[in-house]
Image: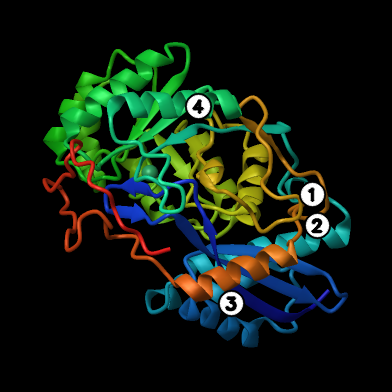
């Protein structure tokens, strides 16, 4: 089998409501790049990457020159062709490599008639459990509904998610409001579901002292972990020495060099593996093996996915023996998907790993057309800006918090 073409299409798919985070906001939709790698036998493998637009599409177009004629089974060769580690000093193509790896694995699975998890060593579970992913939210620009700002709204939103999807783990995304307010909200969330596990992620915007203060104040809860309370391995290490809650990261251990540093002088207990940030599903499987050896925890990170990327997370989750935590996904915030059959279904807080050949998902061409047209109309959105606070930007450590009493309507172009 040989690669004959590489295509990329940017889409934007609406969310239920805009998701607020420490550095700004997802303005009511995700922008993703859908990658198609076609082989000489007519099969098409699918990949996906965060963000999009001309620069992302151009990056994939540029990769075509070195990929045409390449055998998609030669995945290690692909790594060096696309993201040679020393050449990457000048062109960080890790995320491009990831999308191409997904597509090549999809091609192989289709050609061999097996699901990707069978190529990765075989599944150890059929269902991958997920955490509710509870954000502070602005009301939907389309419906005016879905705001999450008050503590009652935080608990009510988690209750709705649990009822609808069956989650037994709740992740709360913070870093938006003053830490004491978010502490109150997190404690209220944990106390509303005393039998469920909870985790908190302020996206690394606190000072180390603030991280210690928050960490000590939640020690009595059923915490999976406290995720990225502070930025940098040294801040994480100092925090870890002073609190009795495990720390997790998707920011300061995102490659093998950092993983080695964390093994030699541990700062983080749980590594959140992201199939895009690490450069593919196989890189995550390798990293999980290092974590297994050194008895570090492993979970699956979500960088905001449509169905193709979700499939990569499911195949990863299915094959990791040491996946000891529910995975994260933004997926249930989406209103639609670009794969055949629409949004994948949760049952009891889990999603079944696809069993079809390859990644097990196919493009719904009408949906791709609809959401690529929506992208052409709306373009990108500034992820690191807050539509409710024009001109604002966060510091690290931050002290420019949003005001939880501020209920002024926010205008978001749509
Ligand atoms: Mg995180």
Label 2 Cα crowd, 10 Å radius (few <14 / some 14-19 / many 20+):
many
* Left or right of 186 in this view: 297: right
Q: Nearer the viewer, mark 3 or mark 2?
A: 2
**Which quadrant of the view contains residue 220?**
top left
Where is residue 332 drawn, in percent x and y?
55, 41
Residue position marked by numbered label 1 in the rendering: 115
Residue position marked by numbered label 4 in the rendering: 160
Q: Is residue 404 visible?
A: yes
Q: Nearer the viewer, mark 4 or mark 3?
A: 4
- Give the Cα distance between marks 3 and 1: 25 Å
Name the element at disc 2.
helix
Residue position marked by numbered label 2 in the rendering: 109
**Residue at 43%, 74% in the rendered image:** 88
Q: Are marks 3 and 2 in contact (CB under 8 Å)?
A: no
* Left or right of 78 in this view: 142: left
Going from N to C along the chain, the mark reached first, 1 or 2, is 2
Q: Which mark is residue 81?
A: 3
């Amino acid at each position: 089998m040989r690669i004959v073409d590489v295509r990329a299409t940017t889409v934007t798919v609406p969310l239920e409501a805009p998701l607020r985070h420490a550095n700004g906001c997802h303005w009511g939709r995700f922008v993703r790049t859908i990658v198609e790698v076609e082989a000489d036998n007519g099969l098409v493998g699918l990949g996906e990457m965060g963000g999009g637009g001309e620069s992302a599409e151009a990056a994939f177009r540029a990769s075509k020159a070195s990929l045409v004629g390449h055998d998609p089974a030669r995945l290690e060769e692909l790594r060096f062709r696309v993201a040679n580690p020393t050449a990457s000093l000048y062109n960080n193509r890790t995320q491009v490599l990831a999308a191409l790896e997904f597509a090549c694995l999809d091609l192989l699975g289709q050609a061999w008639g097996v699901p990707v998890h069978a190529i990765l060593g075989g599944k150890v579970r059929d269902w991958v459990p997920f955490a509710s992913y509870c954000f502070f939210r602005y009301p939907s620009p389309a419906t005016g509904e879905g705001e999450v700002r008050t503590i009652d709204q935080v608990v009510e939103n988690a209750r709705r998610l649990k009822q609808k999807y069956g989650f037994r783990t709740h992740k709360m995304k913070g870093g938006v409001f003053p830490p004491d307010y978010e502490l109150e909200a997190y404690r209220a969330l944990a106390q509303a579901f005393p039998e469920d596990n909870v985790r908190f992620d302020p996206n690394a915007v606190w000072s180390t002292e603030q991280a210690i203060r928050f960490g000590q104040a939640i020690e009595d809860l059923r915490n999976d972990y406290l995720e990225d309370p502070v930025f940098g391995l040294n801040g994480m290490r100092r925090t870890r020495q002073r609190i009795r809650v495990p720390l997790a990261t998707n920011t300061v251990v995102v490659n093998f060099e950092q993983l080695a540093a964390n093994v030699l002088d541990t700062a983080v207990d749980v590594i959140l593996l992201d199939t895009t940030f690490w450069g593919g599903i196989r890189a995550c499987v390798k990293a999980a093996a290092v974590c297994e050896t050194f008895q570090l925890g492993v979970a699956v990170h979500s960088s905001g996915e449509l169905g193709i990327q979700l499939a990569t997370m499911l195949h990863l989750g299915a094959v990791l023996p040491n996946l000891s935590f529910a995975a994260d996904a933004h997926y249930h915030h989406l209103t639609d998907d670009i794969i055949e059959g629409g949004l994948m279904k949760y049952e009891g807080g889990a999603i079944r790993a696809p069993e079809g050949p390859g990644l097990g998902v196919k493009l719904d061409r009408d949906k791709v057309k609809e959401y690529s047209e929506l992208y052409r109309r709306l373009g990108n959105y500034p992820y690191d800006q807050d539509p409710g606070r024009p001109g604002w930007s966060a510091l690290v450590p931050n002290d420019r918090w949003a005001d939880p009493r501020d209920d002024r309507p926010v205008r978001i172009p749509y």
